[in-house]
Amino acid sequence: MPSLHQWHGDDRCVLNSLRELIIKDCSNFQKISHRMPYLEKLVIKGSPKLAILPVLPNLNSLTVSRNGRLFWQLLPPLTSLFSLRLKGLGEAYLHQGSLRGLNSLQRLEIVSCYELIKLPEDWQHTNLVYLGVKHCPKLRFLPDELGKFGALQDLEIQRCPSLSSLPEQFGFMKSLERLEISDCPSLLAMPSSLPTSLHVLSINNCRWLKERCKEGKMTGPRSKTSSLFGLMET
């Protein structure tokens, strides 16, 4: 609906029964002012001018695809948000501070952000249980802050061909149970230590990592790295 600019509602318009809202391909849509106090799931796709949302006190799932930077600058507090999925964002850097204040967030997935080079360093998501970073071909670094994610249990890194290293703080993620890394051909080494809580470790199609392991050039204790890699290869 390219002709739609805003969805306006005054204080008398309260959508108490609305639980799920999908906004798709509204290229000129800028503002929502309806009150939706019990909205639980919001999907926004292909609406790059959308910048203003009402307060959504019960929102627990948000998917944002192909939206502009202004959206993050004006996003209201989402204190109940449990799951956030970002897809197809066209920025090289996520807006600094855009992920602050999401104290209930437990699942974060960043997918197909083709221009993304680096993730923010100012993360405060100590409650994250799952983090997935997938199909981000220009991503070079993961934040050192990962070491502070004491609740993180599941980490997936897929199809990030420019990623060359992982944070050394991996060993501090005391709750990490599953680590999957696939299709990261530039990845040269694993961190010198891995969490003792790790139950599942899967690494596939990481060419340089495989070669360095064979040559005995991996960082960290060689015996531990080599034995782990023997279990990882499929």
Image: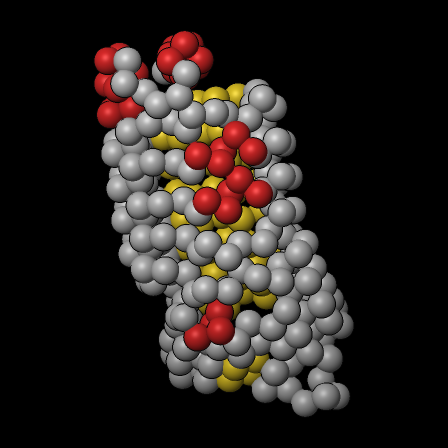
Residue drawn at the location 41% of the way across and 49% of the way down: 111
Query: Can residue 152 be seen by looking at this rendering?
Result: yes
Q: Position of residue 215 (x, y in %)?
A: 24, 13
Q: Position of residue 55 (x, y in %)?
A: 66, 74
Q: Position of residue 142 (x, y in %)?
A: 41, 44
Question: Of 230 and 220, which appears nearest the observer?
Answer: 220
Quarter of image, res 163: top left
Position of the C terminus, as image quadrant, is top left
Residue drawn at the location 32% of the way across and 20% of the way down: 218
The correct choice, above or below, for 47 with respect to 123 in the image is below
The correct choice, above or below, for 195 with respect to 134 in the image is above
Residue drawn at the location 57% of the way across and 62% of the way down: 100
Q: Position of residue 15 (x, y in %)?
A: 71, 75
Query: Can residue 205 be seen by looking at this rendering?
Result: no
Residue drawn at the location 36% of the way across and 60% of the way down: 93
The correct choice, above or below, for 92 with respect to 163 in the image is below
Question: Of 25 and 225, which appears nearest the observer?
Answer: 225
Position of the N terminus, as image quadrant, is bottom left
In the image, taking residue 150 as reference, residue 181 lies left or right, namely left
- The count of marks equals 0
In the image, taking residue 229 as reference, residue 122 lies left or right, namely right
